Image (spheres, grey):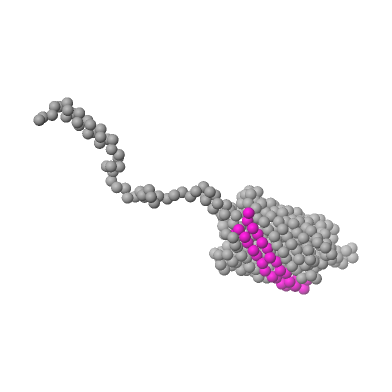
Amino acid sequence: MIARPGYAIMAVLVASTALCALPRTAFADDDTSAPPASVAATPAAPDQVKAEANAERRKIDRTWLYLDDARTPDQWQVIGTTSIGYTTVGSNPDRVASPYRPFASNTAQPGALISLGAEVGLTDWLSLEAVGQMDVAGASAGPSPGALVDLRARLTPASWKNLRIVASGGFARETWQGASKSDDGDIIPGQPHGDNGAWAQAAIVGDINRLRLAFTAHGEHVFAEGRDGVDIMIKAGANYKVLDWLRAGVEYVGQDLEESFADGAEGGARHFIGPTAAVQLLGERLSLVAGPSIGLSAISPQFLGRIGVSYGF
């Protein structure tokens, strides 16, 4: 039986329409480059990404006992600090010392000195620091308070990971009144409840693989009669990353260096040196630094010991 031409044409049109309606993948070659849907990467949940970012942001790196770490926190990050130090009573008394950075002629504070403070990032390169201090077991009859308030500015780009420079300066209220000269030229020993002063400091830290080197220069002026025009302190140190969480090193402090070649209110320059150990815990949010030191000259403190703690919030 021969089909009529009209029916043949209709059959061709129906077949063509059916073929066009089929999915294109039915005619495509197998694409082996596309991963199966069952093994496609699953994006991290927003809460997980946020938690990881916060954990990274709270990391801190404080490895010096006396030197400046030449770091500033990220914007609105807060780093809490506290320390306790002890100097043999009978050492030449002097003034306040911050948790990691003693100030000129401040490291021989007799007895125990406790510090508590915080640093907050105002921008990604500028921070504000405030520290309260108390002499609690020294030569004074009772506790003697002091305080520090300063601005800290990072001078190197954030992309520089192996070299950092920070400049800082601010106000200091001594826990002790520093030694001074009488009208006859005699040295009057320091007393509790000190004077006000202003100071400026520059710090540089560099990393060479596991070795870390640091240098800090500090100068201050106390607004009181009979005091030196400027007190100068130099600090230098080196430490080495023994383990991922442990650094061991040595630090040197020379204070009142302006009196190395001339008489001054503090009675001469002092020097001390000692080993340090720095530990980082809790995902690098907690830093502990401690170490003993010995004096290198007759008027230097015979023994100093300090432990400092920092925590990133």
Q: Position of residue 86 (x, y in %)?
A: 74, 67
Residue at horizontal 68 percent and vertical 63 percent from the top? 308
Judge whether residue 252 can be spotted in this image: yes
Q: Position of residue 24 (x, y in %)?
A: 30, 40
Q: Residue furthest front?
A: 1
Where, quadrant-wise, is the C terminus in this rendering? Answer: bottom right
What's the magenta region?
Answer: 284-313
114 displayed left or right of 282: right
Q: Is residue 241 magenta?
A: no
242 to 170, vertically: above or below: below
The one nearer the camera, 113 or 95, is 113
Residue at horizontal 44 percent and vertical 49 percent from the top? 42
Q: Main secondary structure of the magenta part?
A: strand
Quadrant position of residue 245: bottom right
Q: Position of residue 198 (x, y in %)?
A: 76, 55
The one nearer the camera, 107 or 40, is 40
242 displayed left or right of 88: left
Residue at horizontal 69 percent and vertical 51 percent from the top? 128
